[in-house]
Image (spheres, helix red, strand yellow):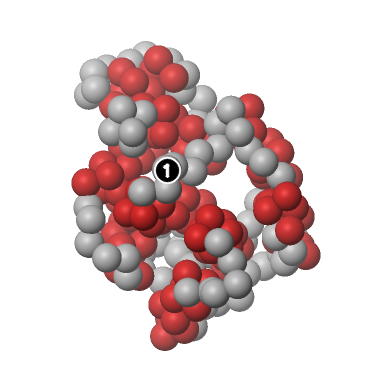
Amino acid sequence: MAKKNLVNLVFSTSKFEGTRATLSQTRTIIEGLGVSGVTTDDIITIVNLKRGWQFVITNDAPYVLAISNQINVLVAKNDSLEPGHVRAGNVMLDNTEYVPPVPEIARVAPAIRGILEAENKTFTERLLDLLLTMMCQQFYWDGNKRTAFLTINYLAIDAGVGLFNINESQLEAFNNLLATFYETGNGDDFNQRKFRD
């Protein structure tokens, strides 16, 4: 399913970065052909997301933090100060006053394990908690939304539960809920809101 929907997955994930490429232009870029009217930055973002999604789709190693690190290398290699490395300094987020704390590197992997092993939640709820935690805590210098989104899909594909996707029409609502989550730390609205095509 993920292989068949690669273009759509790359297209929708690229919208986290505000790319302006159309679905048709995204398909052309993924096929390795030239396209006019798309900025170099948008082309790089799309190509990097293609590589990230291909990694997620083809790799079947058990999940460990190194998987997310590799995803970050692929999707943020042209954006990040140190792609694939948990950040050791401060970052700022757009459209919010929230400033994520500098993560303690030794605590990142155990924190992720704790989320994934929570006994009182469904697997889907745990994946959503992981998504929100990775986005809110900003483990990496850049590419956190892309890395988080591909990470939960890596886990979802491995478990055979399907795919998580936020399409373009859902993105504004998702970003509004995410901004509220940054400020309050309350993810209940995500669990109650259904993002369906």
Task: Using the rendered image of the protein, determine whether residue 40 is visible from the camera's viewpoint.
Answer: no
Picture quadrant where residue 174 is located: top right
> In this picture, is 123 found above or below 53?
below
Q: Is residue 125 above or below residue 40?
A: below
**Residue 149 rendering spot, x and y as whole percentages:** 47, 50
- Determine which quarter of the picture holds residue 2: top left
**Residue under the image location 42 percent in, 48 percent down:** 161
* Residue 45 located left or right of residue 121: left
Q: How many numbered tags mark residues here?
A: 1
Q: Which quarter of the rendered picture does the N terminus lie within? A: top left
Residue at the image point whose x is 41% and y is 52% from the top? 156
Amino acid bearing label 1: Gly
Q: Residue at x 63, y 57 (%)?
A: 93
Rendered location of residue 167, percent (x, y): 55, 31
Residue 36, percent across and down?
37, 14
Q: Nearer the viewer, residue 133 or 119?
A: 119
Drawn side of residue 37 relative to residue 136, left or right: left
Could you say whether the residue bearing mark 1 is in a helix, strand or loop?
A: loop
Mark 1 lies on residue = 162
Residue 49 image position (x, y, % from top left): 35, 40
Q: Residues within 10 Å of mark 1 (few under 14, many from 20)?
A: few
